[in-house]
Image (tube, rainbow, N blue to C red):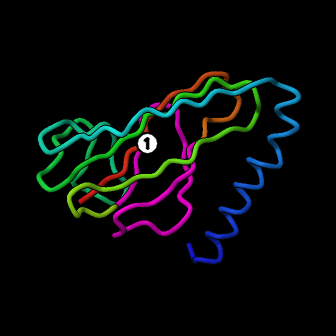
């Protein structure tokens, strides 16, 4: 995706979060979003997902040497129809981002091109039409 298209997509997503939020709050009540501190899965531990674009990370297989998966669990208790959380991911020990993966019911939107950067910000959001959702967003670092 080109840079202008990413900017337009990110702007539209933020507009939906902000613009739709006021009407949704009035109709549905409060929403609680809880983000847990980052955790890491390292070499030898089992990968919880297939990493798009990184053939070395496959669900149920051992994470290869040189890779670290940095995860943040996000829990939603939905009252409003629109809510999300901004998350910052940083790779440890000079490693850089390669891709992202998820487990459970958490979606995300990357706000910029992140491959080969040390850190980035994303927006996490729950699936539509759900009252409670929980999932973990992982950054694949190498």
Q: Which residue is mark 1?
A: 137
Kindly state the secondary structure of the residue where label 1 is placed.
strand
Residue at image x 73%, y 38%?
Answer: 82
Q: Please say if 2 is above or below 75.
A: below
Q: Is residue 24 left or right of residue 40?
A: right
Residue at image x 38%, y 67%?
Answer: 115
Horizontal and vertical percent position of residue 56: 21, 54
Q: Please say if 130 is above or below 82.
A: above
As for residue 113 lying within the magenta part, the answer is yes
Residue at image x 37%, y 58%?
Answer: 99
**Residue numbers of the magenta segment:** 98-124
Q: Please say if 133 is above or below 120.
A: above
Horizontal and vertical percent position of residue 103: 42, 35
Q: Quadrant of residue 136?
A: top left
Horizontal and vertical percent position of residue 6: 61, 69
Crowding at mark 1 (Cα within 10 Å: few <14, some 14-19, many 20+): many
Q: Quadrant of residue 14?
A: bottom right
Which of the pair 106/35 is nearer the observer? 35
Q: Is residue 139 left or right of residue 108?
A: left
As for residue 50 lying within the magenta part, the answer is no
- Report the label total: 1
Q: Main secondary structure of the magenta part?
A: strand
Horizontal and vertical percent position of residue 80: 76, 30
Q: Is residue 119 left or right of residue 59?
A: right
Residue at image x 53%, y 28%?
Answer: 75
């Amino acid at each position: 995706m080109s840079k202008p298209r990413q900017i337009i997509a990110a702007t539209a997503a933020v507009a939906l979060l902000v613009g739709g939020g006021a009407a949704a709050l009035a109709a549905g009540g409060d929403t609680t979003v809880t983000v847990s501190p980052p955790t890491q899965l390292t070499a030898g531990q089992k990968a919880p997902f297939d990493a798009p674009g990184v053939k070395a990370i496959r669900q149920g297989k051992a994470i290869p040497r040189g890779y670290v998966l940095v995860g943040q669990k996000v829990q939603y208790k939905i009252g409003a129809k629109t809510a999300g959380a901004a998350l910052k991911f940083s790779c440890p020990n000079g490693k850089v981002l390669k891709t992202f993966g998820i487990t459970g019911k958490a979606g995300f939107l990357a706000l910029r091109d992140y491959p080969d950067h040390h850190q980035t910000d994303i927006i996490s959001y729950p699936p539509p039409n759900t009252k409670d959702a929980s999932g973990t967003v992982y950054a694949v670092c190498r």
